[in-house]
Amino acid sequence: MKKIITISREFGSGGRTIGKHLAEELGIPCYDSEIIEKVAVESGFAEEYVKDKGEYTHPSLLMSLLTNRSIYTGPTNEDKIWLIQCKVIKELAEKGPCVIVGRCADYILRERDDVMKVFVYADLDARAKRIVDIYGEMEDAPLKRLREKDKRRAAYYHHYTDMDWGTCRNYDVCLNSSYIGIDECVKILKDIAQNA
C-alpha cells in the first residue's frame, strides 16, 4: 500500500473533501488545517496569516518573479513559512500512513517511494457552482475568485518547486471530479492506494 497520499487540487474541485473521505475509508489521518496550526505554533505567525502565505504567493513577490528574480534580496515571511511547512509535512509523513491536502506536499515528499501524488481538477462551471453551494461564495463573481485562487496557487507552487502546478507529469493520478464524481474519486484512490 502507498503509505502517504498527497492531494493537490484546483479550488472548488472537491479535493479537500476527497482527501478527508479517503482518509476515513483507509482509517488513516488526514492533515489539512492541522498543518497550518503546527506551522503557526512553530513560526509565531497567526493561523490566518499562515493559511494565506503558506499556499499563495504575495502579489508583490509574484511581480518581482515575473520581472526580475534579482529584485528578491532575502528571505521573506513566505520563505520562513515554507521552510517550517516542509519540516512539519516531513514529520507528519514519518509518523505513519496519512493523507496530506495541499501545501506542496507532493513536492516536499518527492524523494519518498511510498507516496502517491494526486491532482484533483474539475470543470470550471462545476467548480463555480460548488464554491457557491459549499462555501457560500457570492453567485455574481465565483469565476473571478476561482481564477484568482488558481493563479496564486500556481505562482506559489512554481516559485517553491520550479515546476508547473496541475501538470499531469508531476502527479501519479489526476482525476476530474466533475466528470467522475466525489465518491467515485474516493473509491478509485482507495483501490489504487491499497493495491499499489
Image: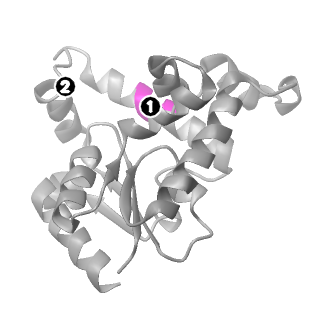
Mark toward the viewer: 2 or 1: 1
Q: Which residue is mark 2?
A: 135
Q: Secondary structure at mark 1?
A: helix
Q: Amino acid at mark 2?
A: Tyr
Which is more toward the observer, 16 or 98? Answer: 98
In percent of width and height, residue 98 lies at 36, 61
Amino acid type of the residue that numbered disc 1 sits on in the rendered structure: Glu
Q: Main secondary structure of the magenta part?
A: helix
Q: Measuring 21% from the left and 31% from the top, which residue is drawn there? A: 128
In the image, residue 188 lies in the stretch drawn in magenta = no
Q: Does residue 24 appear anywhere in the picture?
A: yes
Segment tinted magenta in the rendering: 148-152
Task: Look at the image and tell me whether residue 167 can be seen.
Answer: no
User: Which of 26/117 is in front?
Assistant: 26
**Kind of element beneath mark 2:** loop
Q: Quadrant of residue 158?
A: top right
Question: At which x and y percent is residue 96?
Answer: 42, 65
Distance from disc 2 to disc 1, alpha carbons, whole Å, reads 21 Å
Identify whether 85 is placed above or below 51: below
Question: Which quadrant would the N terminus be assigned to in this image?
Answer: bottom left
**At x 12% / y 64%, what residue is drawn?**
184
Mark 1, residue position = 37
| The disc label shown at residue 114, or none | none
